Image (tube, rainbow, N blue to C red):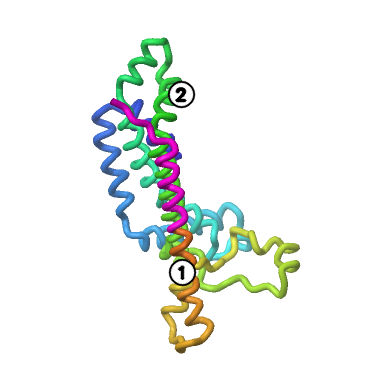
């Protein structure tokens, strides 16, 4: 959806529409995540409970948190992808039009491949942003881990992957543990550093992948 929005802004929207929607996307990207968290809890969760039933969807669930995180990163993907598409030289578009290509064919076969490095980087940055998200999952997804007696019990009941139940992400665990009174040297205390290191490494790997993709698909124009 973010890519489609970027293609519309870059290839189809008029200057007036683009000058209005682009700043709106950038403003949405700057909204504090705590606002998105309460939006998920007070708006998205009641909708899901109304559709699937109150007995199926818990008040704190991963589905509403996931949907809102998708909404949260949408402006980021759209804005960065639109910048990449707009940086493609207009001469490529004019050459495609001169050969009889339609606007859709030009956007899909010419502009999109030419901007692939920037678009790939936008998606990786968005994934990195979603992985490190804290407040939305802490508010909407719950503040406690799913406990099972064994793996077979979790897999047989499909409770491990049930999006309508509450769960605790790594960032949510940090919020819950650090907000309480924990003793130095305990398992909870050391888990904060272990999870923090893991999140750092995940983000680092994603950023490295982003750089590799940029270098791999970079196009240079005179």
Predominant SS of the magenta segment: helix
Nearer the N terminus, badge 2 or badge 1?
2
- Does 186 sit above or below residue 157? below
Where residue 149 appears, as percent x and y from the top left, is: 71, 75
Q: Tell me the number on the disc at residue 197.
A: 1
Instruction: Give the residues drawn in magenta, as a range.
Output: 204-222
Where residue 18 appears, as percent x and y from the top left, is: 28, 33
Instruction: Between residue 97 and residue 205, name the one nearer to us.
Output: 205
Q: Tell me the number on the disc at residue 162.
A: none
Q: Is residue 101 left or right of residue 163?
A: left
Where residue 124 appears, as percent x and y from the top left, is: 44, 48
Where residue 62 appears, as percent x and y from the top left, is: 54, 60
Spatial CA distance of label 2 from label 1 is 41 Å
Q: Residue at the location (39% across, 27% down)?
A: 111
Q: Residues within 10 Å of mark 1 (few under 14, many from 20)?
A: few
Q: Is residue 165 left or right of residue 91?
A: right
- Does 5 sit above or below residue 142? above
- Locate the N terminus by quadrant: top left
Helix, strand, or loop for circle 1? helix
Q: Residues within 10 Å of mark 2 (few under 14, many from 20)?
A: few
Give yes or no for residue 219 being in the magenta stretch: yes
- Does 9 sit above or below residue 213? above
Give yes or no for residue 159 being in the magenta stretch: no
Residue 2 visible in image: no
Residue 60 visible in image: yes
Pointers 2 and 1 in contact (CB under 8 A)?
no
- Locate the C terminus by quadrant: top left
Q: Residue at the location (40% across, 62% down)?
A: 38
């Amino acid at each position: 959806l973010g890519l489609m929005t970027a293609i519309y802004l870059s290839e189809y929207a008029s200057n007036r529409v683009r000058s209005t929607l682009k700043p709106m996307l950038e403003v949405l990207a700057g909204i504090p995540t705590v606002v998105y968290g309460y939006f998920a809890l007070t708006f998205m969760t009641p909708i899901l409970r109304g559709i699937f039933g109150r007995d199926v969807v818990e008040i704190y669930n991963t589905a509403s948190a996931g949907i809102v995180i998708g909404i949260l990163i949408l402006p980021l993907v759209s804005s960065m992808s639109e910048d990449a598409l707009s940086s493609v030289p207009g001469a490529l578009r004019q050459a495609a039009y001169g050969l009889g290509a339609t606007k859709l064919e030009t956007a899909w076969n010419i502009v999109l491949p030419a901007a692939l490095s920037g678009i790939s980087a936008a998606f990786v940055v968005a994934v990195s942003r979603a992985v490190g998200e804290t407040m939305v999952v802490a508010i909407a997804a719950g503040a406690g881990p799913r406990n099972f007696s064994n793996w077979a019990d979790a897999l047989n009941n499909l409770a491990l992957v049930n999006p309508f139940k509450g769960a605790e992400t790594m960032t949510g665990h940090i919020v819950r543990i650090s907000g309480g009174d924990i003793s130095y040297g305990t398992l909870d205390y050391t888990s904060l550093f272990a999870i923090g290191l893991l999140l750092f490494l995940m983000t680092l790997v994603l950023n490295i992948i982003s750089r590799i993709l940029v270098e791999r698909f970079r196009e240079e124009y005179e």
